[in-house]
Amino acid sequence: MIRFASLGSGSEGNGLLVEAGSTRLLIDCGFNLGETKARLARLGLDPSDLAAVLVTHEHEDHASGVARLARRYELPVYLTYGTLMALGPDRAMLPNVKVIDGHTPFVIGDLELHPYPVPHDAREPAQYVFSDGDRRLGLLTDTGDSTPHIQRMLSGLDALVLECNHDLELLMNGPYPPTLKRRIAGKFGHLDNDTSARIVGGIDCSRLQHFVAAHLSLQNNTPDLARAAICAALNCAAEWITIATQREGLDWRDVS
Ligand SMILES: [Zn+2]
Ligand SMILES: [Zn+2]
């Protein structure tokens, strides 16, 4: 069995926990040390329970808390070469660096990790599919668009955590400056609800036990809009869609 939970999700900080057997991984850490410990405690964990930290890309909401956490608890950090280089001074603080190939699966304890590249405005971003050899959980946030490779990676999953960053109309009519609007809506930016719905519509979702909408913009989206878009694509009830929020994250979900 795999289970997963979120410390928080959105542009102010991200962290996803994935567990199989006795292996617990933290994917991204965009919170300071105190906040990370408090959010882990909420889910019944201490940083010393983690086997490793994975970093999807160098943006602050994913990487700002990684170096201090890893140094304090001597955790190995897995990331691509591009992400490592883009970490800047934080690089020197990492106690144990594991450079990964963004196309090649690897194993940590009881978990298989299947990284895959995504189009996002970072140096060498990688998102992941996690497996215990039986069940598969997919994570996709911080991508401007889908690709045929992404569609293949996410097909036939048992659980999916998918970015629903913004509603395009809210973004375009909202208060952000034009350059930021263009960045977010661009092909190396973030997924809007309709594009996320199209991704879902294009993959095999027949095994899906959980759908979690993630990385919602507090300014340019609402849970209801995200739910409505995804429900239409999945042909499911609105309540079936869960939201990983910025403040509360998401409580443990079992993929059995
Ligand atoms: Zn992000
Ligand atoms: Zn990003």
Image: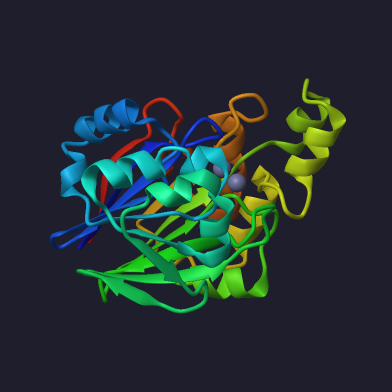
Query: Which residue is at 30% across, 26% downward?
Result: 34
190 vs 161, left or right, is right
Residue 138: x percent and y percent? 43, 61
Q: Is residue 55 above or below residue 167?
A: below
For the image, the number of numbered tags is 0
Residue 165: x percent and y percent? 62, 40
Q: Quadrant of the N terminus?
A: bottom left
47 vs 184, left or right, is left
Could you say which quadrant of the image residue 181 lies in? top right
Q: Is residue 57 above or below residue 21?
A: above
Residue in the foreground of this view, choosing between 180 and 151: 180
Q: Quadrant of the C terminus?
A: bottom left
Query: Which residue is at 24% across, 50% downward?
Result: 74
134 vs 216, left or right, is left
205 vs 159, left or right, is right
Which residue ends up furthest to the bottom in the rendered image?
A: 104
Residue in the foreground of this view, choosing between 2 and 32: 32
Residue 5 in view (yes/no):
no
Could you say which quadrant of the image residue 150 lies in? bottom right
Which residue ends up furthest to the top in the rendered image?
A: 175
Residue 53: x percent and y percent? 34, 53
